[in-house]
């Protein structure tokens, strides 16, 4: 039971919530490797998370590339360093902007969606109905959703990176007559394996926390429709906060490896 | 619609029947609020047992403890010879295929069609249905039982409250349960639809010889369906007997229900 609903004080509530979220995560890992596996539902959820988030992620990535290049170009031009633009944009988008912005967009869209959907299923007794029909609702609803977000987020990040770079190229092409081949050659030349690996690994973690928090908030939703709204809202807030914390930790860890 | 006069409750001789549910000394509290305070209940094979009580008297808590949706604090709950409190999850899941549950708000999966709702319980329990079972045939048989075969490809949101309740009843029947638990089957329905649901419950009992535990506020429902009535008050089995006997009682606490 989610006993954090009636906190005696803020710090105690924080500790209770953290403990419960950890137990929820442990239960996820236990159930993930236990038979029967819900492959069909995992594919269905991956489709919902991946394909249905694609337009939003693509538009965001494109605008990110456009705006970032437009904002940066005048400063680089002042120092006569416009030729560095593809390298700088490439590194910034792949290392940081792409994963972070995609994760925050997904925390809003997917995290709140999962929180509201499971919350609504909880208050209308659909989760109980699943349980009395002899199906494990945690496996069917929670495990599949967390896995789907964890697996799909890196794919969305790669897509956002590519579209972001394309947006940046369009600006460079219009302002500096740079060809497609030259722009992407310069962008990829400066990228190393060490840029791609931490970015991809942290994207998996971003996906995991977005799915985990969304499912946790929705699964233990209470107090009718008000509780559903609260579940969706707090799923976004907590997941976004955790994305920032994971990003900070990932940068620290990557920095240690670079300096070895 | 089924005619009321054709279907009347059987008067079950509780001495010669097999006990399918046996609850003894059930306790459940939420903080300091003691909801069930040593509640006892027996349900016999083929019997319709109605539990009546005020709002908040613990009827839904009792039925949820009975099916393992809520842990009891203490007591003994035996369903079809299995102790609900001590059995493992796998055995509980198997047992649940023999116990149907009709939820108060129908609890249809709103992201699935009627067909998918009915097929859902079959996913993990194909063994019970036999090797050569035909899912399509079972779905249509269940829907025909509730007179809604034409809704098979509709979404729950496209159906009225009464239709949703009947589809939920069809879903409950799909695994051929021996016992059906009804949590307020007529609540939130207009009197005509409520009567249709009552008649449907009677029809299903006759057809499949199920044992039913019905929780209700609806005295018409209790009168028509109930072979035996239990009054739940202060967390205990306050009174028990046939409807007419309880209705004629001089006890003011009972009169409050029947007047």
Image (tube, coloured by chain):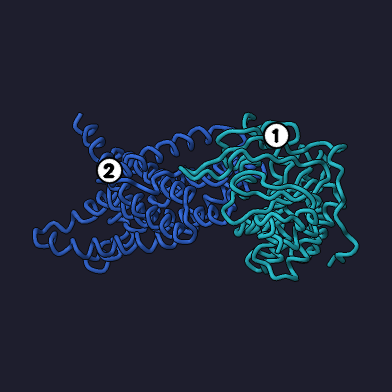
- Which residue corresponds to mark 1? B78
Query: Regarding mark 1 in the picture, which secondary structure is present there?
Result: strand
> Which chain does blue denote in the image?
A
The colour of chain B is cyan
Can you tell which mark lies on residue A46? none
| Cα gap from disc 2 to disc 1, whole angstroms | 43 Å
The outermost residue toward the right is B6
In this rendering, position of residue A29 left or right of residue A205: right
Q: In the picture shown, does residue A215 fall above or below B92?
A: below
Subunit of mark 2?
Answer: A
Residue at (74, 68) in percent of width and height: B193
The quadrant of the picture occupied by the C terminus of chain A is top left
- From the image, state whether disc 2 or disc 1 is nearer to you: 1
Residue A153, can we see it? no
Q: In the picture shown, does residue A116 fall above or below B73?
A: below
Q: Do the residues bearing badges 2 and 1 touch, measured as CB atoms within 8 Å?
A: no
Residue B45 in percent (x, y) is at 82, 41
Task: Pick whichever, B220 or A255, lies toward us.
Answer: B220
Residue at (45, 34) in percent of width and height: A26
Q: Quadrant of residue A197?
A: top left
Q: Quadrant of residue A257?
A: top left
Crowd band around label 1 with a 10 angstrom C-alpha radius: few (<14), some (14–19), many (20+): some
Task: Pick whichever, A183 or B93, lies toward us.
Answer: B93
Crowd band around label 2 with a 10 angstrom C-alpha radius: few (<14), some (14–19), many (20+): few
- Which residue corresponds to mark 2? A11
Residue A183 in percent (x, y) is at 28, 56
């Amino acid at each position: 039971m989610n006993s954090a609903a009636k906190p005696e004080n803020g710090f105690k509530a924080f500790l209770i919530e953290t403990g419960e979220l950890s137990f929820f995560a442990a239960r996820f890992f236990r159930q993930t490797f236990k038979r029967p596996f819900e492959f069909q539902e995992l594919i269905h959820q991956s489709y919902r998370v991946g394909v249905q988030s694609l337009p939003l992620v693509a538009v965001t990535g494109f605008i990110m590339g456009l705006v970032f290049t437009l904002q940066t170009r005048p400063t680089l031009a002042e120092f006569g360093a416009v030729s560095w633009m593809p390298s700088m944009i490439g590194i910034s988008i792949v290392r940081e902007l792409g994963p972070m912005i995609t994760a925050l967009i997904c925390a809003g869209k997917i995290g709140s969606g999962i929180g509201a959907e499971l919350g609504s299923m909880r208050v209308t007794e659909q989760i109980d109905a699943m349980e009395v029909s002899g199906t494990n609702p945690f496996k069917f609803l929670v495990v599949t959703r967390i896995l789907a977000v964890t697996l799909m987020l890196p794919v969305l990040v790669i897509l956002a990176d590519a579209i972001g770079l394309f947006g940046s190229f369009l600006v460079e092409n219009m302002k500096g007559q740079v060809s497609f081949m030259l722009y992407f050659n310069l962008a990829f030349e400066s990228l190393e394996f060490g840029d791609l690996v931490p970015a991809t690994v942290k994207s998996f973690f971003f996906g995991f926390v977005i799915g985990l928090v969304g499912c946790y908030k929705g699964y233990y939703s209470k107090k009718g429709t008000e509780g559903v709204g609260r579940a969706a809202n707090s799923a976004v807030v907590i997941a976004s906060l955790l994305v920032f914390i994971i990003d900070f930790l990932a940068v620290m860890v990557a920095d240690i490896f670079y300096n070895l | 619609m089924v005619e009321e006069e054709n279907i009347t409750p059987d008067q079950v001789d509780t001495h010669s029947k097999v006990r399918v549910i046996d609850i003894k000394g059930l306790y459940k509290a939420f903080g300091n609020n003691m909801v069930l305070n040593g509640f006892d209940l027996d349900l016999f094979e083929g019997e319709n047992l109605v539990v009546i009580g005020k709002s908040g008297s613990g009827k839904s808590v009792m039925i949820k403890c009975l099916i393992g949706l809520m842990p009891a604090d203490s007591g003994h709950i035996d369903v079809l010879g299995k102790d609900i409190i001590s059995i493992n999850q796998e055995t509980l899941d198997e047992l649940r295929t023999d116990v149907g549950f009709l939820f108060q708000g129908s609890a249809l999966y709103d992201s699935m069609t009627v067909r998918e709702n009915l097929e859902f319980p079959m996913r993990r329990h194909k063994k019970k249905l036999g090797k050569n079972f035909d899912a399509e045939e079972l779905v249509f048989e269940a829907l025909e039982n509730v007179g809604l075969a034409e809704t098979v490809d509709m979404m729950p949101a496209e159906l009225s409250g009464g239709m949703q309740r009947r589809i939920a009843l069809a879903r409950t029947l799909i695994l051929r349960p021996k016992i059906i638990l009804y949590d307020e089957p007529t609540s939130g329905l207009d009197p005509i639809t409520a009567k249709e649901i009552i008649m449907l419950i009677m029809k299903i009992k006759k057809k499949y010889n199920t044992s039913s535990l019905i929780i209700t506020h609806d005295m018409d429902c209790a009168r028509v369906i109930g072979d035996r009535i239990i009054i739940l008050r202060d967390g205990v089995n306050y009174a028990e007997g046939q409807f007419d006997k309880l209705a004629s009682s001089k006890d003011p606490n009972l009169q409050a229900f029947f007047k």
